[in-house]
Amino acid sequence: SDVELELPALLVVAADAPQFEDAEFVDVRLEMHGDGGAGRAAVERRLQRCELAELVVAPGFLLEKGYGAKAIVHEPIYGKQVRHGPDWIVREGSTMVLLECTGSSTTLATKSFAEFDTVAQDMLKIYAGRIRQFPAKIEALRSGAAGVDCTGVERFIPAIVTHEPNYIEPALREYLAELLRSEASMLDDVKLIDIGDLEVVTGWPQLSMTQLLDGWTGVYSKEPQSFRPYLENKARAESLRWRNPYLSDVFDNFFRSEIIPDWRNYPEIPAPA
């Protein structure tokens, strides 16, 4: 029987990626046709046991593959009271991009009914605490308290990376500003992106993350939009490969395994038309 599976290139498992604290694995969709139950069970067993370590990747794998290990710092821990810095830091010349990653997701009630109270609770849970922590984390980096070499760094770009797609960033930003009220100014410089965006940008090592985020900001001032549409337009205009080459290899190797022995090479995904 035919077994059809739709899987995102990136899977994140909490055991191997504590910065996505409550995600068992991210956004896995399996569609089965015929009596594909056995195939489905095999896939699910292997994912849950994390046997394919090369498939179970955290943002750090993407960042190191895209920009090199020397440019990446993973969550500095410092101070007598044990404070934590950003989950991931990308050093690009005089700029550091600070990534806070979260596996927290919107509840079923929010997805189904979008009632004000449940939406507000979810947005505060996912974003508010991380937004409020950025100023202190940036100051710890500037002062040297975090123990990270920031010599020559003049600029910090904070960003929150969610595992849920962020298709409505302008509306989300406006809503968060209302929830944060007097603290809304903290949100001004924070970029709101998702793990799919990170997959794309780390596949373009010839373009720095700073360059892409700044380009998005420039467009945003004229036409507010999520990061993904900006990246899609960039890919079209410059004929950039849409599919992350590292994840392409991992994805193809997975389906060449014993689960689906006759798996054909997964076709290249073109840039959005």
Image (tube, rainbow, N blue to C red):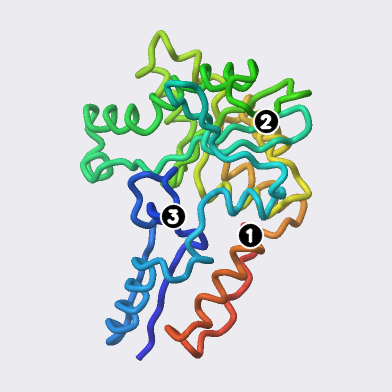
Q: Considering depth in this image, is 187 or 69 the residue closer to the camera?
A: 69
Q: Nearer the viewer, mark 2 or mark 1?
A: 2
- For image coordinates 69% across by 48% down, the residue present is 69
Count residues near mark 3 (Cα–Cα under 10 Å), then give few for <14, some for 14-19, many for 20+. some
Q: Amino acid at mark 1?
A: Asn
Disc nearest the viewer among 1 and 3: 3
Q: Nearer the viewer, residue 47 or 264?
A: 47
Q: Determine whether the residue tagged by mark 3 lies in a helix, strand or loop.
A: loop
The single residue placed furthest to the top in the displayed view is 182
Q: Earlier in the sequence, mark 2 or mark 1?
A: 2
Give the x, y percent position of residue 189.
Answer: 58, 22
Separation of residues labelled 2 and 1 (CA atoms): 22 Å
Quadrant location, the C terminus: bottom right
Q: Is residue 206 left or right of residue 66?
A: right
Q: How far across and how far down the image is residue 204, in percent?
A: 71, 52
For disc 2, the neighbor class at 10 Å (few under 14, some 14 to 19, many from 20) is: many
Q: Amino acid at mark 3?
A: Asp
| Of the two numbered discs 2 and 3 in the rendering, the one whose residue sits closer to the viewer | 3
What residue type is disc 2 on? Met
Residue ranking furthest to the front: 80
Give the mark, 2 or 3, whose residue is nearer the N terminus. Answer: 3
Provide the residue designation for mark 2.
96
Find numbered disc 2 in the image and state the secondary structure of the residue it sits on: strand
Task: Give percent across and percent down for residue 125.
Answer: 32, 31
Q: Which residue is mark 1?
A: 244
The residue sitting at 58% across, 47% down in the picture is 198
Which mark, residue 211? Answer: none
Q: Quadrant of residue 229?
A: top right
